[in-house]
Image (cartoon, helix red, strand yellow):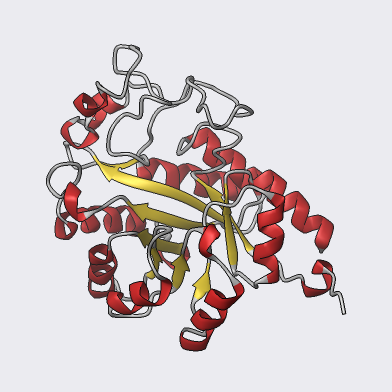
Amino acid sequence: MNISLSSLFRWPEVHGHRGCRGLLPENTLPAFLHALALGVDVLELDVVISADLQVVVSHEPWLNPLICRGPAGEALSLTTASRFNLYHMPYALIRQCDCGQVRHPDFPQQLSQAAVKPLLGEVLAAVEAASFEMGRTPVNYSIEVKSLPDGDNLYHPMPEDFLPLVLAEINAAAVAARSTLLCFDPRILRLATHLQPALATCLLIEQEQAWLPSLQQLGFTPTTFGPNHLTVSAVAVEALRAIYPNLKLVPWTVNETSDVQRLLRLGVDGITTDYPDRLLEYLRQLA
């Protein structure tokens, strides 16, 4: 018997990836505010650390030549990107670099505009104020800490120095109850459970990593699990649910309708997307 998707429909959380990367420059205030207005449930963003220990919203700990210009407005290249390591730059200098007017080549519909890498505290304050003005339900935050062992003291501080800086911003904005800490680095998540046990955590894994061994090696059960969406299968989900029945499953990064349909049939709890407008419209048609 064929069962329609609408008959199985359970509305998942909509996570705006780097705000709404397919529509506006990633990890910028315009992208977060637009995603908020669209109606996302969760804003996903990434954080790194500047030379003066400011928590900066950025996916890479350097200036990405695909989307950024240097502090003097100069074009960047892959060979010069290492000269602009954000961990070696004070935030005042980072602030001089535009990361919005160069359209990401993978997102031709993206609306380019002048934008800088904001501070985490700045984003949280702006989004909270805008949410109140809109009269909408307060949004949740998925904050990815960009830490990896091979980047220690090169692109970021050690976990014991990195994480407290991030937690301080989350707590100062009074959004801890609506925030989830994401990381590919298990060290960050383990430390978070000691420093702030009530904070939700999400283990992210790459496509080549096995689900269950990765979770078991973590040493505790996080709140959420974030695998590459290409690895989500009926067999994998069934095995996950058998051992971790209460673990939220939020795969990344899903932009095609066919993938959305597949994931909805498999009962995921959330979907991270560069195009929250498309996902929200599709879900409304199903509901």
What residue is rendered at 22% in x and 28% in y?
Answer: 82
Foreground residue among 77 and 248: 77
What residue is rendered at 16% in x and 33% in y?
Answer: 88
Can you tell which quarter of the image residue 95 is in?
Answer: top left
Q: Is residue 93 above or below residue 38?
A: above
**Where residue 270 appears, x then y in whole percent?**
59, 64
Can you tell which quarter of the image residue 149 is in?
Answer: bottom left
**Image side of residue 224 versus residue 74, left or right:** right
**Where residue 236 appears, x then y in whole percent?**
53, 75
Q: Residue furthest bottom?
A: 242
**Where residue 253 appears, x then y in whole percent?**
53, 51
Q: Quadrant of the C terminus?
A: bottom right
**Where residue 76 appears, x then y in whole percent?**
33, 18
What residue is rendered at 40% in x and 28% in y?
Answer: 116
Q: Quadrant of the N terminus?
A: bottom right
Q: Is residue 45 above or below residue 137?
A: above
Q: Is residue 198 something that shows in the picture?
A: no
Foreground residue among 276 and 120: 276
